[in-house]
Amino acid sequence: MTIPATLPTVAAEAPAEANAGRRNMALLIQLRWLAVGGQLATIGIVTGPMGISLQRAPLLAAVLVLIAINFASLALLRRGRAVTNAELTAVLLFDVAALGWQLHHSGGLANPFASLFLLQVVIGAILLTPASSWAIVAAALAAIGVLAVDPTPLVLPPPYAADPMGLYLKGSLVCFLLIAVLLVAFVTRISRNLRERDAALAASRQRAVEEDHIVRMGLLASGAAHELGTPLSTLSVLIGDWKTAPAIARDTELQQDLADMDAAVRRCKAIVSGILMSAGEARGEAPQVTTMRAFLTALVEEARAGRMPGTVEFNDLFGADLAIISDPALRQVIGNVLDNASEVSPEWIALTASRDGGMAVIEIADRGPGFSDEMIERFGQPYSSTKGRPGGGLGLFLLVNVLRKLGGSASVANRDAGGAVVRVVLPLSAVAADGESV
């Protein structure tokens, strides 16, 4: 069976791209509000203190159009879906058209603010695909061409009529400062968005690699379970025969050893059956409905089997019990954590269960050597182990990924009193039986 390596990565990249599109649209909305405020201030200053006559109606109409575009853009964001390149292109084309309309009614190319087309071209080049960026360039050139044909001239009052070039240069300086400030602010924000997107893509790719690794491990585990079934059954039959053999039946010590061997074989068979059931190969097996307290108690009792009395402590702070669907994978990974804790701390381990709102919190503590800084940094990565044996370090890796599938999380830390603690946070809604309120 071949595992496709590209499909998970493509699926994982989609949310990151979708978030980038939404952030870019939100940034355009903010810039457009700044443009609306700047245009209203400019109209007020030019027609007020400067005394230059402008056609206010068409200019204010363009401002209203920009406000309408912003509200439409906000509606796109509220729908919760990705913002596409076509939608970003459309709103930028509206911006180009609105600027062209305002310049047409305020002097055309003689207006120093005609350079603002450059800002929109740069924004398009950063945010859009190459084809859409060239569409913005074409739209800006078309607007400039239209502005060259019969624009509404500016009628300058006497203080400025004597030196129109001086007024143009001052306006050009203001326009340059405006473009420079907006570009720095915009490019800085876009760079941050791109860094966040790249980080999200890297995390998504890493998650896809880990999930692919788990699939391969599952295939190997399922195959090994099939192969182990026959020898385990043979061992079980042989142990049964030895128990009834006359020479052995009279030896009490051998009978005790055989009983221990039989219990170990039964446990191995149960583990194999659990692997096959998790792989979907069990037949006639319905999901088991139990309660959270019974689920945790079973984990503790299994950890206590074969250990000295009093070495496994169970602190039940969960509160009101809850009916859940027992998940074999969850039971197995938490059992692995208990086994790991018992290996490094055979004299004492503790499982503490509590509830934080709609989350179950399970903490497994020990008095072992604790985690090194490197282990804590690499927590959740495969083959990160202090045991030094081949294939080690998969227990916490599987724990993290099983909890991730259920919407939960896991963390590790060192205890002040010595030893380590593994903290599992699990949404109760992910395991609650149908109809149960969490």
Image: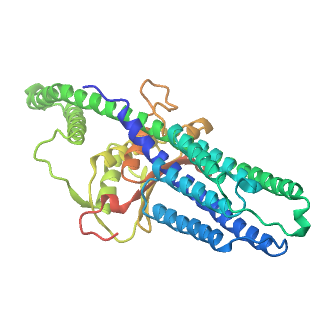
Tell which of 151 and 126 is nearer to you: 151
Q: Is residue 179 left or right of residue 370?
A: right
- Give the position of the C terminus as an image quadrant: bottom left
Q: Quadrant of residue 4?
A: top left
Q: Residue at the spot x=60%, y=43% of the render?
A: 126
- Whether residue 355 sits left or right of residue 44 in the image: it is left
Instruction: Tell me: residue 415, above or below residue 357.
Output: above
Q: Whole-percent x and y of residue 149?
A: 64, 53
Describe residue 44's horizontal placement relative to residue 225 as left or right.
right
Residue drawn at 33 percent across, 48 percent down: 330
Mark yes or no: residue 406 visible.
Answer: yes
Residue 261: x %, y % from top left: 23, 32
123 versus 217 height, above or below: below
Q: Residue at x 28, y 51 (%)?
A: 327
How did the renderer colour the structure? rainbow
Q: Residue furthest bottom?
A: 48
Q: Nearer the viewer, residue 211 or 312?
A: 211
| Side of 151 where 248 appears, left or right | left
> Camera-side residue: 242 or 98?
98
Q: The N terminus lies in which quarter of the figure? A: top left
All told, the count of numbered labels is 0
Residue 416 in percent (x, y) is at 62, 52
Asked if one can make out residue 348 in the rendered structure from this viewpoint, the answer is no
Residue 80 at x, y percent in the picture: 43, 60
Front position in the image: 212 or 16: 16
